[in-house]
Image: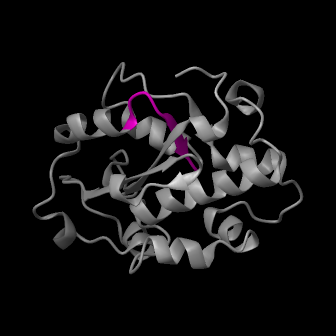
Amino acid sequence: MPLALLPHQVVFAAIDFESAGVSPGSTDTPVQIGIAVMRDLALAPGESFVSYLHTTQPITWQASQVHGITAAHLASAPPFLSLWPELNSRLANRCVVAHGAATEKRFLRAFPLHGFGPWVDTLTLARRFWPGLRDYSLESLIAAANLSPELCAACPGRHFHDALFDSIASLLVLRHLVLQAGLAQRPLQQWLP
């Protein structure tokens, strides 16, 4: 993807994972994935994707308290690696967006040499272009920008810490920052780290 493109010329694909949580003697594993798309700085709801992910690792009590996902949700879920064709078709040749992108990048290491990117981390962007906030959590940014009504309308019946809801929230934060920080007329290469 050419970094000389303006934001309205770019297809953004936001990705979010929810995880099983870390328990002693194990590493974290994803239990839900959500992908949402924005074209011409408008959500593309028909291109969204969400799935629970099968894992043999138990979901920790703490993680379940945050996202509400239980073993019952994962009973017939596909294994993460089986979703490669789906992920490739939804993320390839797109600018990938995530809030606190390190987690998403870490889980995508399951697909070595995937080549997705460039990446936009809305947490990093918000800190850079919206300084002085006490809290840069996705929920706080949505509230501060008064985007809750649009988010809830775009994703009815879902809530924060649902992978699709958080993906859409990341795109709304990105669009808000692009429009409010004067980035709409600046190519990606000028504002991506």
The answer to whether residue 8 is magenta is no
Report the number of discs.
Answer: 0
Q: Where is residue 83 in the image (x, y as percent from the top left)?
A: 21, 41
Q: Position of residue 5 (x, y in %)?
A: 64, 27
Q: Position of residue 114 (x, y in %)?
A: 36, 24
* 70 lies left or right of 5: left
Q: What stretch is highlighted in magenta?
A: 91-99
The relative height of residue 118 versus residue 48 in the rendered view (above or below) is: above
* 50 lies left or right of 65: left
Q: In which quarter of the image is the C terminus?
A: top right
Quarter location, residue 146: bottom right
Q: Where is residue 94 in the image (x, y as percent from the top left)?
A: 47, 33
Residue at point 43% right, 27% down? Answer: 93
Quarter location, residue 134: bottom right
Quarter location, residue 54: bottom left
- The residue nearer to you, when weighing 86 against 33, is 86
* 74 lies left or right of 133: left
- The residue nearer to you, when weighing 154 against 123, is 154
The relative height of residue 160 versus residue 19 in the rendered view (above or below) is: below
Residue at point 24% right, 40% down? Answer: 86
* 173 lies left or right of 119: right
- The residue nearer to you, when weighing 182 against 148, is 182
Residue at point 79% right, 49% down? Answer: 127
